[in-house]
Image (spheres, grey):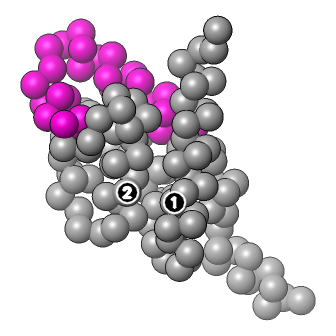
Amino acid sequence: MRTLSQKYAKDVFEKVKAAREKFPASEDAQKYRSMTETLPVLILQSGLAQALTFLQSRGEKAQQQLLTDLSRVVTDQPREEFVNQCLGAELDEYAYLTRKSLVALSWFKRFSASVLGDQDAEDNSEEAL
C-alpha cells in the first residue's frame, strides 16, 4: 500500500513532465516552476482559498496549468470545482485540503526544479564555455 506522499510523487512527476512538453519555451516553463515555489508560501500566509483564487485570477497559461495540475492531483476534479470546494469547505475539510495541497506542492517544487530546471543558469553556463 502506497502512502499519500508516494501517490502524489508519481502523479506530480507525470504532470511536470507534461508541463515540460506543453511549455517548451523557457519563459512559460519558468513561470510554472516559479509558481510551484511561490504558491506554498501564499497558502501559508493567506490561506488555501485565497491563494487558489489569486492563482485562478492570473491570466498566464503556466499558472493556470499549475492550478489544473494541482486540482487533478489533490482531488481529481477540474480546477473550478477544486476552488469551489475549498471556498465552501467546513473547517476540518479545509484543513485537510490545505495539508494535501501543501504535500502535493512540495513534490511540484522538487520535480519542477529537476525536470524544468533553471534555463537561465543553463544558458549562463554554456556562455562561460
Q: Is residue 91 magenta?
A: yes
The alpha-carbon separation of the residues under discs 2 and 1 comes to 8 Å
Q: Residue at x 34, y 28 (%)?
A: 75
Query: Badge 1, how many Cα within 10 Å: few under 14, some, many 20+?
Result: many
Residue 115, position as x, y percentages in the image? 67, 57
Give the magenta-colored segment's residue range.
81-107
| Residue identified by numbered label 1 | 19
Going by the numbered disc 1, the residue's amino acid type is Ala
> Can you identify the residue that label 2 sits on?
65
* Res. 55 visible in picture: yes
Say which amino acid is labelled 2. Answer: Gln
- Mark 1 lies on a secondary structure that is helix
x, y (%) of residue 118? Answer: 65, 67
Question: For residue 95, which numbered disc appears in the image?
Answer: none
Q: Quadrant of the N terminus?
A: top right
Q: Residue at x 62, y 34 (%)?
A: 10
Q: Is residue 38 left or right of residue 19?
A: left
